[in-house]
Image: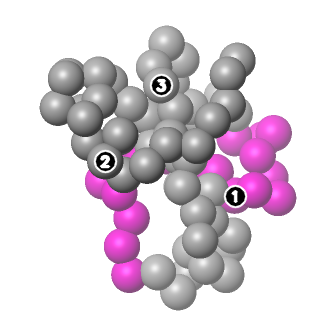
Amino acid sequence: MEVSRITVDEVQARLDRGEQIVFVDARSAEAWSKAGTQIPGSVRVPPDDAAAHMNEIPRGRAIVAYCT
């Protein structure tokens, strides 16, 4: 699995090309509770409990994780 950073513009370009992307909300519980928004359809995976949530991430798509 290749892991790299990606910019917002690069994500938008991929979405514009029709690429299916899974967004993973990897913010801490504290940051998540203070946030007013979440990317619609994103999967919430707390970083301290990631192993327990790996089965919630769809396979066969690019994965973009975001945090604060």
Q: CA distance from mark 2 to mark 1?
A: 25 Å
Q: CA distance from mark 2 to mark 3?
A: 15 Å
Say which element carries label 1: loop
The residue that label 1 is drawn on is 46
The residue that label 2 is drawn on is 9
Q: Residues within 10 Å of mark 1 (few under 14, many from 20)?
A: some
Of badges 2 and 3, the one in the foreground is 2
Residue 19: image x %, image y %?
A: 29, 22
Number of numbered discs overlaid on the protein picture: 3
Q: Which mark is residue 62?
A: 3
The question of residue 41 being in magenta is answered with: yes
Residue at screen point 19% across, 23% down: 17
Q: Earlier in the sequence, mark 2 or mark 3?
A: 2
Residue 16: image x %, image y %?
A: 17, 32
Residue at screen point 67% across, 81% down: 30
Say which element carries label 3: strand
Does residue 8 lie above or below 6 as drawn? below
Q: Earlier in the sequence, mark 1 or mark 3?
A: 1
Does residue 32 lie above or below 54 as drawn? below
Q: Residues within 10 Å of mark 2 (few under 14, many from 20)?
A: few
Does residue 26 appear left or right of residue 63 in this picture?
right
Residue bounds of the magenta highlight: 36-53
Does residue 39 appear left or right of residue 29 in this picture?
left
Q: How is the image coloured?
A: one colour
Residue 54: image x %, image y %?
A: 69, 33
Residue at screen point 38% across, 31% down: 21
Say which element carries label 2: helix
